[in-house]
Amino acid sequence: MGYRILETEDVAGYLRERGHWDLSDAEVREVSDGNMNRVFLASSKDGTRSLAVKQALPWVRVAGPSWPMSPERADAEARAYERVAAVAPDKIPVIHGYDPENYALVMEDMSDLEVLRTVLNEGAPYGPDTSARIGEFVAQLSFTTSDFGLASADRKALIAASVSPELCEITEDVVLSEPYIEHEHNHWHPELDDLAAEFRADARLRTEVADLRHVFMTSAQALLHGDLHTGSVMVGVREGAPVIRVFDPEFSFVGPIGFDLGLYWANTLVSQARAAALGAESDHADQLRLSWEAFEAEFRRLWPTRVDTFFDDAYLDRFLARVWTESIGFAGTEIVRRIIGFAHLTDLTTLPDPVPASRRALLLGRELIVGRAELTSPEDVEALLH
Ligand SMILES: Nc1ncnc2c1ncn2[C@@H]1O[C@H](COP(=O)(O)OP(=O)(O)OP(=O)(O)O)[C@@H](O)[C@H]1O
Ligand SMILES: [Mg+2]
């Protein structure tokens, strides 16, 4: 501990002390709805100025002090934002300051925007831009923090600075092992008992997950967002133009690029499963392809700027093919863990009958994991959906 935990009534004074504004009075409300941290919104009485403050506590917010967690996750978040701000400032909230002593980030108020998962659950489409911007986001962050974008010594420094043992361990456990073994964290709808048991008994599935888990643990390709699901994206319209903001990169570390793409893809596929279960027309099945195409195009656009030209064009093709295959595998693990693991998705849990869509999604997840080497294009994945 040893730092100042902000309560709603402290926030206006804190912003003044930190030099963010000179208002003596401001309206502050807490809007934390995640599991981990506190988020406050502060605005001037006349509504012309507003800021958001996100603070990491030394524990998991919803659990309290019984589940301690290092607040250094806020350092990881600030570091990721700093890297993205240099290459894709239009895709993240404006960061007004980071206070490492109090693990508090002061940023743009995005309360005029909405969380992507929320709007999708309400039946909205992704629209033409969202997934393309996400694909570009992953390309821009990953290229510029990879050995293609940074000199070798700078890369080693980034890897060292970005080590995040506690949060990586959460992913290694919750995403990349627990759903395939007996574990107290796991839960599922009783009508999925048979599939949950089948998955735990499936030796081939387990070996493939072990392979992906080891890639996650060892493949220091680039700085990741680390938790790139549809709840980490805000969308909306400002002055007539679409706006997208990727937020909450507290799980950021240097890892396999396919983990970011795969998480996003899993969430698009689950959103599609929801729309299909409701018999709704949707653009959700296109999103994997749209984000991959944008990722690949942006990565190839940046390729001529690489700092190490020993990496030749043929190697780029090989590298992208590997990223693709790993992304597909990670997408599978994210689908599975969101149905029979610890934390589930409202996309499915709020369906009138979540069972048929959950069963289909689980089988799709397994196929993505075990069949990833044979799935070589977005069309191959689309074929699995039908
Ligand atoms: N800059 C902001 N402006 C407006 N609202 C915000 C802002 N940042 C966060 N929020 C709101 O607070 C919620 C939680 O934020 P965030 O996901 O960053 O916190 P978290 O505790 O890390 O969540 P999780 O447990 O999902 O990791 C968001 O879903 C959003 O509703
Ligand atoms: Mg978070």
Image (cartoon, rainbow, N blue to C red):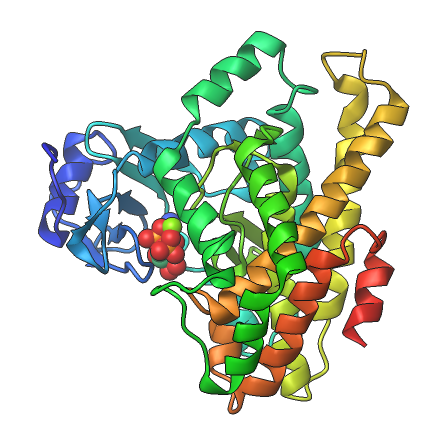
Q: Residue at x 31, y 46 (%)?
A: 51
The percent coordinates of residue 277 (x first, y second) are 64, 85
Q: Can residue 356 be seen in this view?
A: yes
Q: Residue at x 68, y 57 (%)?
A: 369
Does residue 142 sit above or below 337 in this rendering?
A: above
The percent coordinates of residue 94 (x first, y second) are 44, 38
Return the residue nearer the eye: 114 or 320: 320
Q: Answer with left or right where residue 343 lies relative to residue 27.
A: right
Quadrant where the C terminus lies? bottom right
Quadrant where the N terminus lies? top left
Return the residue nearer the eye: 379 or 5: 379
For this orientation, the residue located farthest to the bottom is: 352
The percent coordinates of residue 292 (x first, y second) are 75, 49
Please count the marks in the image.
0
Q: Answer with left or right where residue 260 lies relative to residue 316.
A: left
Return the residue nearer the eye: 199 or 261: 199
For this orientation, the residue located farthest to the right is: 314
Q: In which quarter of the image is residue 310?
A: top right
Task: State ligand 1's quadrant.
Answer: bottom left
Q: Which residue is drawn at 31% across and 62% down?
A: 33
Q: Is residue 127 visible?
A: no
Does residue 246 sit above or below 163 in this rendering?
A: below
Does residue 58 sit above or below 363 in this rendering?
A: above
The percent coordinates of residue 68 (x first, y second) are 20, 46
Q: Which residue is drawn at 62% across and 16% down?
A: 150
